C-alpha cells in the first residue's frame, strides 16, 4: 500500500498521529495511506503561516499573481496523474475528474488576475480641502481552508486562489476521504516557488485538527464547505474570537418546470443536475416541481433518460456515473428511497443497486426518480446528496415558489420557462443565493456563489470571493 505525504511550510512529511486509509469506492480496496496530522504539526503549520504572513501580504499583487499563474501551469502539467488519483479515491469518471483538475487551474489563473484588481477609493472630505479619506483593503491574516471530498480539487482551489491572491497565508485541511488528489494539487502550488510557510496542506480528522484550526487565535479567517450541521459548529467556534468565516453549506435545490418551457431542455438539465457525480454536489437537484399539464410526460422522459446513464468503474470508457464515495452516503440514499416509497411515492426508475459481479464490492446505486413526492418525505425535506430526486406537480407559479421556499436552505434553484414574466417573478421571489433560468448551472467562476439561510454565509467565486479574505481600512488624513 502506497503512503503519500502531506506538506507543512513546503516540507513533505510521512510522520503523523496515525494513518488515514484511502479506499477505492468502486472496489472496496484500501490502496493508500496518508499520515494524520497531530495537534503539534497543526500548530507548526499555523505558526509557519503566521510568520510568513507579513512578507506575503506586503508583496506586490503582481508578484503573487505571477506565482499563482505558475501554480496553474504546474496543475495542468500534472492533470492526468491528479485526475487518476481522484477517480481512484472518489469514484467519478476519469474524464470528469480531468475536467475538474483543469477547472482548478482555471480558478488559480482567475484569482491571479483578480488579485491585481483590488482597488481602494478616495472619498471627498466634508470639512475642507485639507482633509482626505482613503479606503483600502488589506489581507486579513492566516486563513484556514476546510474542503470536502465531492469536488476535492475545485473546492480547494476556490479557497487557495482567493486566499493567496489576497495576500493571506493558508493552512488547508484536505478531506480524509480523498486526500491524495488534493495533496497532489497542493504540491503543484508549492513547486511553483510559493515562499515557505505561505501554504501548508495537512490531512486529519475534522474533530481534531479542523476544530483546532477554527479555534486557533492566530487563524483569522475560516473558509469551510460542508454540511449545515458542521458549518453551524464552525461558525459558533469561530465567533468566540470574532474570526471572519465563509460557509458554503447544505442545500435542497428545487427545480421548477413550467408547462411553457422547452421540455427537452428541462429534462436534460434535470438529468445533469440530479445525477452528475452521483448526485454528490451541493447544488444537486433534490426536488423537482412540474406544472400539472406536462407532469406525466416529464416523468416518462426523465425516467427514460436516467435509465440510459451508464454506471461503472470511473476508469472504464463510456461510464457516466461511478460509485458513491462513502458507505455512509449510500446508507442515506437507501433510507430516503425507502422512506419515500413507504409514504406513497411512485418509483419511476432506480431504487436499487445495479446487478452484476462488477458492482458487488463497490458503492453503486442506480439513478432514482420518485414521483408524487410530498413534503413529509425525507427526499423532499433533507439533503440526500446522492442519485435520487423527488418529483411533485404544481398548478400555479405562486404555488411553485411556495414549494421551492419550503425549506430552511437557500443555496440555489433552477427554473425552466419561456415566459419572461415567470422567469422574473421566480428569480425575485425564490429565497436562494443563486437562481438559474433555463440552464442547470447556477455557478460560474466570475460571479459570486453563496447561500442564504441555512445554506451558509459569505461568497466564493467572483471578486466577492476574493474580498472574503480582505478587511477594510479607512485612513483619514489632515494636511497641515
Image: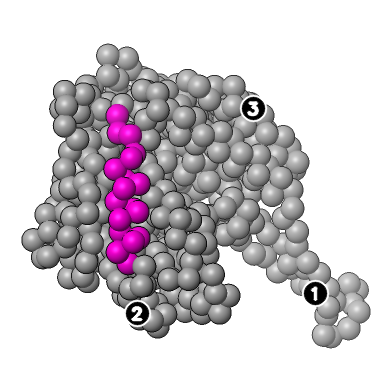
Q: CA distance from mark 1 to mark 2?
A: 52 Å
The x, y position of residue 69, in whole percent, is 68, 34
The x, y position of residue 278, in whole percent, is 32, 43
The picture quadrant where one finds residue 176 is top left
- Foreground pick, 41 / 434: 434
Q: Is residue 183 visible?
A: no
Q: Earlier in the sequence, mark 1 or mark 2?
A: 1
The x, y position of residue 296, in whole percent, is 30, 64
Magenta region: which residues?
A: 295-312
Asked whether, in this view, residue 279 is left or right of residue 65, the answer is left
Q: Earlier in the sequence, mark 1 or mark 3?
A: 3
Q: CA distance from mark 2 to mark 3?
A: 52 Å
Asked whether, in this view, residue 388 is left or right of residue 100, the answer is left
- Foreground pick, 119 / 385: 385
Q: Nearer the viewer, mark 1 or mark 2?
A: 2
Label for residue 123? Answer: 1
The picture quadrant where one finds residue 131 is bottom right
Q: Which residue is mark 2?
A: 395
Q: Earlier in the sequence, mark 2 or mark 3?
A: 3
Q: Secondary structure at mark 2?
A: loop
Q: Residue at x 49, y 41 (%)?
A: 154
The picture quadrant where one finds residue 119 is bottom right
Q: Main secondary structure of the magenta part?
A: helix
Q: Secondary structure at mark 3?
A: helix
Does the segment drawn in magenta span residue 51?
A: no
Amino acid at each position: 500500500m502506497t503512503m503519500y505525504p502531506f506538506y507543512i511550510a513546503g516540507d513533505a512529511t510521512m510522520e503523523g498521529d496515525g494513518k488515514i486509509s484511502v479506499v477505492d469506492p468502486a472496489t472496496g480496496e484500501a490502496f493508500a495511506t496518508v499520515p494524520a496530522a497531530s495537534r503539534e504539526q497543526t500548530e507548526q503549520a499555523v505558526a509557519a503561516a503566521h510568520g510568513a504572513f507579513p512578507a506575503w501580504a506586503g508583496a506586490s499583487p503582481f508578484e503573487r499573481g505571477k506565482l499563482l499563474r505558475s501554480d496553474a501551469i504546474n496543475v495542468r502539467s500534472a492533470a492526468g496523474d491528479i485526475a487518476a488519483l481522484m477517480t481512484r479515491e472518489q469514484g467519478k469518471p476519469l474524464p470528469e475528474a480531468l475536467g475538474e483538475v483543469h477547472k482548478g487551474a482555471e480558478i488559480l489563473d482567475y484569482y491571479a488576475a483578480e488579485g491585481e484588481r483590488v482597488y481602494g477609493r478616495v472619498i471627498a472630505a466634508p470639512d475642507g480641502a485639507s482633509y482626505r479619506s482613503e479606503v483600502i483593503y488589506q489581507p486579513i491574516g492566516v486563513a484556514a481552508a476546510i474542503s470536502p471530498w465531492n469536488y476535492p480539487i475545485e473546492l480547494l482551489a476556490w479557497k487557495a486562489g482567493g486566499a493567496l491572491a489576497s495576500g493571506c497565508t493558508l493552512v488547508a485541511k484536505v478531506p480524509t476521504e480523498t486526500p491524495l488528489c488534493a495533496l497532489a494539487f497542493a504540491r503543484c502550488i508549492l513547486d511553483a516557488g510559493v515562499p515557505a510557510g505561505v501554504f501548508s496542506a495537512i490531512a486529519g480528522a475534522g474533530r481534531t485538527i479542523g476544530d483546532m484550526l477554527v479555534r486557533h487565535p492566530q487563524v483569522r479567517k475560516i473558509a469551510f464547505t460542508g454540511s449545515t450541521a458542521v458549518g453551524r459548529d464552525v461558525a459558533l467556534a469561530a465567533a468566540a474570537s470574532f474570526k471572519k468565516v465563509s460557509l458554503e453549506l447544505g442545500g435542497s435545490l428545487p427545480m421548477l418546470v413550467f408547462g411553457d418551457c422547452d421540455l427537452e431542455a428541462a429534462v436534460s438539465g434535470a438529468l445533469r443536475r440530479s445525477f452528475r457525480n452521483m448526485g454528490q454536489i451541493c447544488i444537486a437537484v433534490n426536488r423537482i416541481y412540474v406544472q400539472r399539464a406536462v407532469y406525466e410526460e416529464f416523468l416518462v422522459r426523465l425516467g427514460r433518460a436516467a435509465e440510459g446513464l451508464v454506471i461503472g468503474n470511473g476508469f472504464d470508457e463510456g461510464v457516466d456515473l461511478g460509485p458513491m464515495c462513502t458507505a455512509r452516503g449510500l446508507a442515506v440514499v437507501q433510507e430516503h428511497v425507502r422512506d419515500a416509497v413507504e409514504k406513497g411515492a411512485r418509483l419511476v426508475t432506480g431504487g436499487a443497486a445495479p446487478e452484476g459481479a462488477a458492482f458487488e464490492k463497490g458503492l453503486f446505486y442506480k439513478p432514482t426518480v420518485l414521483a408524487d413526492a410530498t413534503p413529509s418525505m425525507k427526499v423532499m425535506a433533507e439533503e440526500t446528496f446522492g442519485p435520487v430526486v423527488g418529483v411533485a406537480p404544481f398548478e400555479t407559479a405562486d404555488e411553485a415558489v411556495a414549494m421551492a421556499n419550503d425549506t430552511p436552505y437557500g443555496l440555489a434553484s433552477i427554473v425552466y420557462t419561456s415566459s419572461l414574466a415567470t422567469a422574473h417573478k421566480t428569480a425575485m421571489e425564490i429565497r436562494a443565493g443563486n437562481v438559474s433560468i433555463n440552464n442547470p448551472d447556477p455557478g460560474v467562476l466570475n460571479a459570486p456563489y453563496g447561500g442564504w439561510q441555512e445554506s451558509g454565509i459569505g461568497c466564493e467565486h467572483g471578486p466577492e470571493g476574493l474580498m472574503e479574505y480582505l478587511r477594510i481600512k479607512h485612513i483619514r488624513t489632515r494636511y497641515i
